[in-house]
Structure formats: structure tokens, C-alpha cells
Amino acid sequence: MAVLVNEGLKLANEMHGLWQWIRQRAQAGAVRDYQTTGETLRAIFDHAVQVLERVEAIAQELAGTSGRSIGRLDELAAAVGEVRRLQTRIVASWPWPDRPRPPVNRQMVAESRAAIARGEYEDVGEVLSRFRTGGPVSSD
């Protein structure tokens, strides 16, 4: 049973890694279809949570009936909760196409326009050019 618990912990860790990878791809502009990616991610997390919950339940039951402790079972229980919370955060914050856009911050818009009028801005092309040549993103 200890092997199964360890495998469950590995799965929980892999779910964190999967989210980091997807998030990095999204930030890099490599995700083209957010709807499909979000649905796939949700399905993978649903399945992983079911597996983790089942492994935890079996291990808890075995520990209870045998009277023996199972190594790292407490870590697995915590990991199941972490993966569930991660899934909830991902689904709640995912940019679903049918989700309303956040409200416009009118004060920020006014401040930005005033800064542009004062010449306090950089052209996006200049920023990208500097970044592509190994320079900093900001000219400050």
C-alpha cells in the first residue's frame, strides 16, 4: 500500500507540474483555443482528483481495518486537498470565452492617457526589439 500512496503523491506533484506548463504556454501566447484547453485541463484534473481520492480512501480503510499505519498517508490526504483547491482556482480563473470581461478601470485609463500625452510611454515594437536582443523588458 505504501507504493500506491507514493504513486498518489507523484500524481499530485505531476498535476502541479501540468498546471505550471499550461500556464507558461498561455502566458507565452501558445494557447490558441482556450475553451478546448480549459475543458481538457478540467477533465484531467477531475480524473486525477478521483484517482487520488480513491487511493486515499483505500489506504484509510486498510489502515483502519489492519490497525497499522501507512507511511505518508497524511501527506497524501494533504495532497488530495491541494489538488482539489488548485483545480477550483484554475476553473474559477480560467478565461472561458463566455465569461464576461472584467470592468474597465476608468481612473487607470485616464491616468494612462495623460501619461501618453506627456510622452511617458514606449512603443511596443521598441520593447520587443530590445527584448529579442537580450535587453531588459523595461528601459528603466
Image: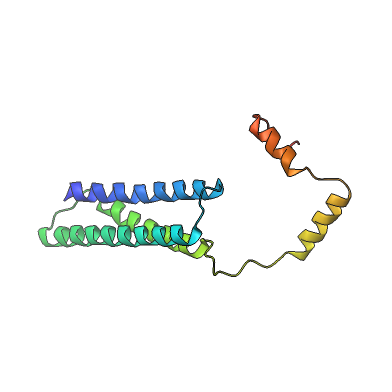
- Figure quadrant of residue 127: top right
Identify which residue is drawn at 80% across, 55% down: 112
Q: Is residue 124 visible?
A: yes
Its colouring scheme is rainbow
Disc count in the image?
0
- Residue toward you, 92 or 8: 92
Percent across and percent down for residue 20 are: 46, 47
Residue at the farthest right position: 118
Percent across and percent down for residue 16 are: 40, 49
- Figure quadrant of residue 53: bottom left
Residue 75 as seen in the image, left or right of residue 118: left
Residue 86 as seen in the image, left or right of residue 54: right
Q: Is residue 138 visible?
A: no
Residue 7 as seen in the image, left or right of residue 104: left
Identify which residue is drawn at 16% across, 58% down: 63
Instruction: Say which quadrant the C terminus sits in.
Output: top right
Identify which residue is drawn at 50% across, 58% down: 34
Asked if 109 appears above or below 4 in the picture, the reply is below
Identify which residue is drawn at 22% across, 48% down: 71
Residue at the farthest left position: 66
Percent across and percent down for residue 115 are: 84, 51
Asked if 134 appears above or below 32 in the picture, the reply is above
Percent across and percent down for residue 84 are: 38, 61
- Residue toward you, 57 or 131: 131
- Residue toward you, 106 or 10: 106
Residue at the farthest front position: 32
